[in-house]
Image: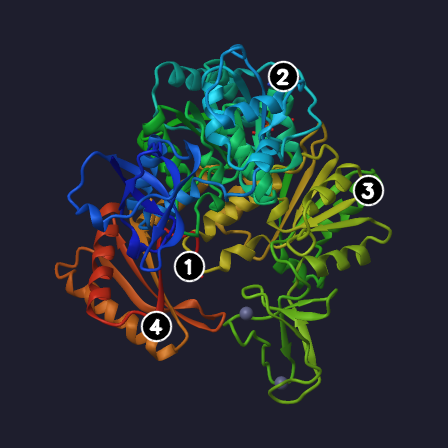
Amino acid sequence: MGYAGIITENTNTNVDRLFTYKIPDDMKIKEGMCVKIPFGKGNKIIRGYVAEIYDTVNIEDEKLKYIVDTESGEEVISQKRMSLALWMKNKYYCSLSSCVQCMLPKKVNEKLDYRLSLGENTGIKVKGEKQKQILSEMEGKEFVLLSTLKEKYGNVSQTVESLVKRGILVKEDVRKYRGNIKDIVKKTPPVPTEQQREVLSVIEKAIDEKDIKPILIRGVTGSGKTEVYLRTIEKIISLGKQAVMLVPEISLTHQTVERFTSRFGERVAVTHSGLSSGERYDQWCRAKKGEIDVMIGPRSALFTPFENLGAVIVDEEHEHTYRSELTPKYDAGEVAEKLGEIYGSITVLGSATPSVSTYYKALEGEYKLTLLTNRVNNTYPDVEIVDMRKELKAGNFSVFSSKLRNLTQETLSKGKQAIFFLNRRGYSSFVSCRSCGFVLRCDRCDVNYTYHLKSGTLSCHYCGRNTAVPTLCPVCGSKYIKYFGIGTEKLAEETLKNFPGCRVLRMDTDTTSVKGGHKKILDAFAKKEADILIGTQMISKGLDFPDVSLVGIVAADMSLNGGDYKASENTFQLVNQVAGRAGRAEDKGNVVIQTYSPDNYSIACAAKNDYTAFYEQEILFRKQMGYLPFVNVFRVLFEGKDQSETIRQIRRFHGILLHYNKKGKFSLYGPNPCNIEKLNNKYRWQIIVKYSLEENLRNYVLYCLEKYKEEGNTSTCNISLYMNPNNMI
Ligand code: ADP
Ligand code: ZN
Ligand code: ZN
């Protein structure tokens, strides 16, 4: 008899250890298998994953329970993936179970069956009654489905297995896969440019020499990075290996997928949140069976069960969506690097605007740096910054500067298309009383309401609450309620007003909530069913419309005022990305950047498309202020229903942090209320802890947190931890 160390599917950190179970004699158990076990006092049957197998254990046999059943005969998670899960558990301070589970798709009913037919050894005599029954069923038939046999004779799996083993029957998988890509058109690849060849030679050398140091491609938009990815994957496939292609979810358009399938045909699969669980599960299974070579998708595609992984490519590596904000709070780039250690796969990071931390690593030699400095078609749009303060002074109160207005008219008259970018949805960003100045806010959150014209409601963009607009001011009773600020909905209205007869499409969370909503809008725009596409950051990347000759960035400084240390980086990236949408074809194209802070370096550098100048300024700021890549920032967030209790608890925790920081090694900031102190009826306070070394910082905070939990009641607050968070809302 053997024993198994099992991780339960319970992700609670209190049960985050291996539980020992007995393996029944007639059960075949392998590491990585999914099993069913009785758990807890009530012996509720739950799922578990076999992490280890032992011959003997130091526990009395009677105290142990048996594994009840296996989910399938195979392992669902390989040893290598299990080691990745262990690494993630420590690095991202979460339970092992949650790491294992993020590697597995949600289990759904498989469209699964087996087709049984007679094999080579049909003539052999059988013993057993059941076997005879089955064979008589087969008579005169080309095949019989296992499900048919089960319906007639009950569970005959074991009997069938033994017949298969002896070559009397042949068993074939007849599963139907959901989510396969259709409409594949093969295309001839272009000949690489000189620069592309140089980058490719670095990548190929790394593959040949099994050098896993990550490679960063800094390449302006349209410089042919994707073509480099395609050729890298080609090479990986030729070696009999597999590749994961990561793209930010919002740029996972039909266009992107098409470029991959036109090269690799049906050996490509896609995974993303718009698919059904069944589709995702089936594509995961295809990967496990070795039926595909490439998986394209957002960060979760990292967990595609490729056991001969050759490369992970991270496009637009600076995108914040590569950092999960849900448990486990992993960073896709870091996991890709770890996969490199485990599988010997290479990691390729690509961006026109690499994150400051990544670029720093490349300059320090931790990554290999390669450059694509020219656009393939060698055309660059004319980029112009418009100072909106001057427009106001000149009496122009419209959202359109005269420059943008003129260029739009010109574009329309030529039958070309334009894109207007505004990173705020809705109609008006705040609503207030003109008499007393009262601003209408969500009473569950510490946030202004946004007015949506179409629904006629006030909406809270944080908790989703919708409410009617009051006719009278709730404070002074005045009827003068006024709308301020502009969102995409209002911009669309203004556009129609200013350019009569033009056709407008709007793309934001409000217009794309239905399945396939994105594709519908983009297809319509590609077919020139509209002249102007208006959108939020959803339209900032991955899109390639040859007829777009004008891009207007309506309010470039909007993201500068978020109070976040990454605000400049985000603004630079966003402006640069959006500007990159213009002049993709022969047409040169224009970009107009409207701003109230034209001298801000992130806007000025983005307009000049000068990454290096931006980086040099930004890295100084980071060094002076003590931020990444020099200092790691760990955010500890307390959330509770009761304000004073939340403050009391975070102060208690702060006391413990102070107690274990006598030498002042770690820098502590707070406790302070968060930028948004109340969210969804919960009060939010935070402490920021900074230190140069990530591991020491993590260990210190986790140790203090353990002490905090030991020393008193902790049930009144929810505590969340974020290492180098995307934002500090
Ligand atoms: P990026 O990913 O850097 O934005 P892409 O790979 O999308 O750049 O390339 C931009 C455009 O140039 C695409 O339309 C692509 O098909 C085309 N392209 C890329 N490489 C070549 C090449 N070597 N020769 C001709 N066209 C190319
Ligand atoms: Zn009022
Ligand atoms: Zn709210």
Q: Report whether 380 appears left or right of 23.
A: right
- Above or below 638: residue 512: above
Q: Indicate which label's residue lies in the foreground, 1 or 4.
A: 4
- Above or below 598: residue 339: above
Mark 2 secondary-structure assignment: loop
Mark 3 secondary-structure assignment: loop
Mark 4 vs mark 2, CA separation in Å: 60 Å
Image point 27% across, 48% down: which residue? 17
Q: Residue at label 2?
A: 189
State the mark number for residue 728: 1
Which badge, 1 or 2, is on the more N-terminal residue? 2
Q: Residue at label 3?
A: 529
Q: Does residue 377 appear anywhere in the picture? A: no
Q: Report whether 293 appears left or right of 587.
A: left
Residue 148 horizontal/vertical position (percent): 62, 33
Q: Residues within 10 Å of mark 4 (few under 14, many from 20)?
A: some
User: Which picture quadrant has residue 70?
Assistant: top left
Mark 4 secondary-structure assignment: loop
Point out the quarter of the image occupied by ligand 3.
Answer: bottom right
Which badge, 1 or 4, is on the more N-terminal residue? 4
Which badge, 4 or 2, is on the more N-terminal residue? 2
Q: Indicate which label's residue lies in the foreground, 3 or 4.
A: 4
Mark 2 vs mark 3, CA separation in Å: 29 Å
Q: Residue at label 4?
A: 716
